[in-house]
Amino acid sequence: MDHLSSLDASFLHFETPETPMHVGSLMLLELPKGYQGDYYEDVKAMIGKRVHLATVLTRKLAPMPFELAEPVWIEDDDIDLDYHVRSLTLRRPGTMAQLHQLIGRLHSSLLDRSRPLWEMYVIEGLEDGGIAFYTKAHHSGVDGKAGTELAKVLYDVSPQVREVPPPRRRPGAVGYQLGVAELLQAAVANSARQYRKLAELLPTAARALTAAGSVLAGQRKGSGERALNLGLAPKTMFNDSITNQRSYSTMSLPFDEMKALGRRVGGTVNTIVMAMCSGALRRFMKERNLLPKAALIAGVPVSLRAEGDDAMNNQVSMVRVDLATDIDDPAERFKAIHASSEAAKAVVRELRPVLGVDLPVTGSPWLMTSLASLYGRSQLARRLPPVANVLISNVPGPAMPLYVCGARMTHFYPVSIPYHGNALNITVQSYAGSLDFGLTACRRILSQEESYELIGHLRAALEEIRQLPGVGDAAAESPQPAPAAAPVQAPAAKTPRRKARPAEPAPAARTRAPARRPAAAAKRASASARRA
């Protein structure tokens, strides 16, 4: 029995029929040449042999009596693979547009909480002869980083399917229905541990808050600089209550090229992604006369996971990044986005000791669930000013190619969570030299056609960034006047000699002037003689 943290449980409590809280991945696979087997059966058999390697696949929820405390995870020793691993086939011709629409529908349905919270789909019928593999798991049990750890368990790094040790059945396995007294005792003990940790953390929290305040004070604008945006975000078309229907689209870019571009223009891959989203959203909304005068704000998840931590839970927080959509000049907009992103990271580094701390709240399951339902159905998301306009996430993925039952994975697209007040989620994941984008949105607010339109604007924004002057170019331009001064001085030394020729009449004039003096003297002498 393992208690959910308050952060893990919040993804359960905030889930409503309109807002499924699971994350997913869409993988495109290339079958080995000459493959003649039943790929779905091969995948199901492989998962059956490895399901015990990832706890997220073998545990399910046990709620507390009267929902007085957070639920607990318990082991499920009877996993129905035919339910969790499913097979689908696209209708002809099997285009990517058909696949996107199918993923949008699959991602809109809730997971069954009486079972382990995951599903996988082998999708055949693609027009290029490949296979699509879609997985989804509840966010209460896995975040983006933990998802990549799960990928290392399920997938191989070569076409050879590796063998794993078989599972060992544990004696005295716990059933789903635990005793009321046992559950309440565990809840009280867990709350006591949380309060004790909270008390022990108070001195560290005070130091962290002081350091974060110093970072914020240091981010105050200088003369002519853009102020750090600490206020609420402007109202946009994406800040509304949503339905459970989803639109979905994908895009891929070469990862090394993005890294090189980031270095050239003075940013990171994350800055490139943010600037692309800023330019695309700015153009998309400007074409509809919906662009607010104030800058859009992105809600950006940041990982709090320590190096080497492979626990299958959530260790994540959220920061806000200024997308500077009110700036017309692309270069200035890029600088503002990069500065805002770096400032947000600096604050998170100082607050890391206190972020993600469990805060026990008696009755939080029914309280938070009621508030989430009220927030969506009362249209408060449309009326209240938003904290952020859009959700943007950049998840580092496996750097090497992965294989699923011998089939090479060519792309690893993320499928994420929009929510009331944030109808669009743009998640980016790096994989094996590729940067794979997944746009997940409420279909009522951003239709499938509009999602493709936004993909086109992302590509246009990337071209705009490619036209920016490089940091090295700007540095090279500043010292250029110094070396250029030497060649300019040499002609300047010769200039007087070239100008001496037109100036030669001046000495001639001076020569004629003395010639006039004897004549004048003769006239004066003649005049003196006449007077005499």
Image (cartoon, helix red, strand yellow):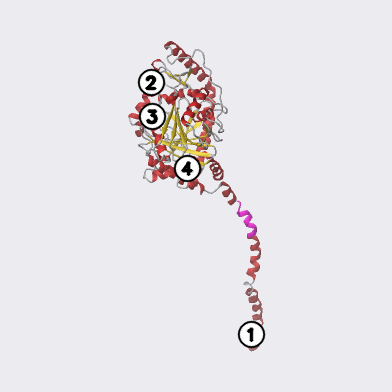
Which amino acid type is marked by label 1?
A: Lys
Label 1 neighbourhood size at 10 Å, few (<14), some (14-19), many (20+)? few
From which residue to which does the magenta span run?
479-487
Q: Which residue is mark 1?
A: 523
> Vertical placement of 143 versus 517: above or below?
above
Kindly indicate whether the residue at mark 2 contacts the one at mark 4 (C-beta within 8 angstroms): no
Alpha-carbon span between mark 4 and mark 1: 92 Å
For label 2, the SS is helix
Q: Position of residue 293 (x, y in %)?
A: 40, 43
For label 1, the SS is helix
Tell which circle, 4 or 2, labels the residue nearer the N-terminal end.
Answer: 4
For label 3, the SS is loop
Residue 348 visible in rendering:
yes
Which amino acid type is marked by label 3?
A: Ser
Numbered circle sitting on residue 276: 4
Tell which circle, 3 or 2, labels the residue nearer the N-terminal end.
Answer: 3
Tell which circle, 1 or 3, labels the residue nearer the N-terminal end.
Answer: 3
Kindly indicate whether the residue at mark 4 contacts the one at mark 3 (C-beta within 8 angstroms): no
Q: Which residue is mark 3?
A: 109
Kindly indicate whether the residue at mark 1 contacts the one at mark 2 (C-beta within 8 angstroms): no
Q: Position of residue 236 (x, y in %)?
A: 38, 39
Numbered circle sitting on residue 366: 2
Q: How many marks?
A: 4
Q: Residue at x 38, y 46 (%)?
A: 287
Alpha-carbon span between mark 4 and mark 2: 40 Å
